[in-house]
Structures are given as structure tokens and as C-alpha cells.
Image (tube, grey):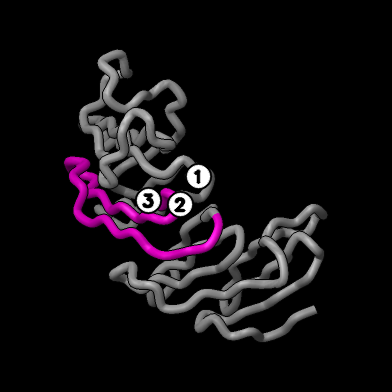
Amino acid sequence: MILQNDLCFINISIDTTYTVESTDNKPYDLVINPKHLRHNDMYKTFSVQIDLFSKVISIALIGDFYSYDKDCAVLEDKILTILQNDTVVQLDINDGAMINFKEFDCFGCNYGIYRVQNGYIIYGEIEIIMLDLNFDKKWSFSGKDIFVSMSEKKAFELCENSIKLHDFEGNFYEIDFSGKLISEV
């Protein structure tokens, strides 16, 4: 995933070669492991490259094995917010320091995080979750099946005033930003 603003250019990818507790890893400026995962745990490592145009900070962010790098982060001014399945980490882009870490309850895997007016929407396999600005869970919405589409229809679409969803069975849902069902087909 690539993000950028006037302050930086960020590239987040999966480092498939990183092994926790190994001395043979690619060198990183920082290794952040907020859940204290160990070598035998199931984990995935995000390689976070923050280019501040005057220097580059390289970070290994170790998190849940069921983490995806497609829509995993939000960049707001000097704060980078990264989703790794059921956890959110916030980093200061100036030095890469972790400024916030929060674990939240959910069912299934989470695919993406999106900034909305009063917090963050989490697109998950089984539920759509609203987190407030402190990453506390405000609501969740589930359908009849997983939010994955086998057709040309988008499984998850964040619109201006609503969220449109298609599940595996082809059911359609539209919810508002309070988690209330607007329509269902």
C-alpha cells in the first residue's frame, strides 16, 4: 500500500522473509512488536518505509498472521494508523515511534481501515465495525454470509453517506454510518 501527503511518502508491504527472534533479518531502523509475538507464534510482518524526503525510516511491524496490506493504513498529517487484523497501531511519521496501540474484539478477519468523520470503519470478513477516534468499538454490522463477492459486484464500497455491501450469497446491504440498515436485497 502506498500513501503520501506533503510531509512524506509511505510504502507498506509484507516482509515474507522476516523471522521474529532471528539475527538474519533484513535490517530495520525499528522493530515494533506490540503483542510480543514470538518465533513459534503465527504472525505477519509489515515492512513500513517512511520517506520524509530528508531521511527514510524503515520499520518492521509485527502483527497478526491474518493481516492484509491492501487497505491497511490511513495517513493523517504526522500520524500513520495501521490495521493488522484485530489491532490498530499508530505511528509518528517523524521518528516511527508507536504512539498508540489498541486491540478490539471482532469475528473473522479484517481487510481494511478507512477514516470517516467520527472515527474509523473496519471492513471485515464477517462484520463491518465502527471504531471511534480512541479506537473503541461503537457498533458492528453482520450479514447472512461473509462480505466477499464472487461476482463483479464490490463486496465493500464506502460511499459518501453509506456503506454498500455484498455477501458471498449475493445478498446486498446498505448501512449508514450509525450501523443501521438502510436497505437490503
Question: Residue at coordinates 73% horizontally, 66% vertically from top-left?
Answer: 166
Q: Magenta part of the protein: which range?
A: 83-108
Q: Is residue 106 left or right of 33 when viewed as pictured? A: right
- Measured in 3D between alpha carbons, the distance from the residue under mark 2 to the one under mark 1, in whole angstroms, is 6 Å
Q: Which residue is mark 3?
A: 82
Of the pair 58 and 20, the residue shown nearer to us: 20
Whole-angstrom CA distance, mark 1 to mark 3, is: 14 Å
Are the residues at dot 1 and dot 3 in contact (C-beta closer than 8 Å)? Answer: no
The residue indicated by pointer 2 is: 85
Look at the image and say whether residue 104 sits in the magenta stretch.
Answer: yes
Residue 107: numbered disc: none
* Above/below status of 93 relative to 172: above
Circles 2 and 1: CB atoms closer than 8 Å: yes
Q: Position of residue 64 (x, y in %)?
A: 42, 44
Badge 1 or badge 3: first in the primary sequence: 1
Magenta highlight on residue 103: yes
Q: Nearer the viewer, residue 77 or 169?
A: 169
User: Residue 133's image quarter?
Assistant: bottom left
**Mark nearer the viewer, 2 or 3:** 2
Do callouts 2 and 3 mark residues in contact (Cβ within 8 Å)? no
In the rendered image of this protein, does residue 35 appear above or below residue 86? above
Q: Quadrant of the C terminus?
A: bottom right
Q: Residues within 10 Å of mark 3 (few under 14, many from 20)?
A: many
Which residue shows up at 30% across the image and 59% down it?
102
Q: Position of residue 52 (x, y in %)?
A: 26, 38
Residue for badge 1: 66
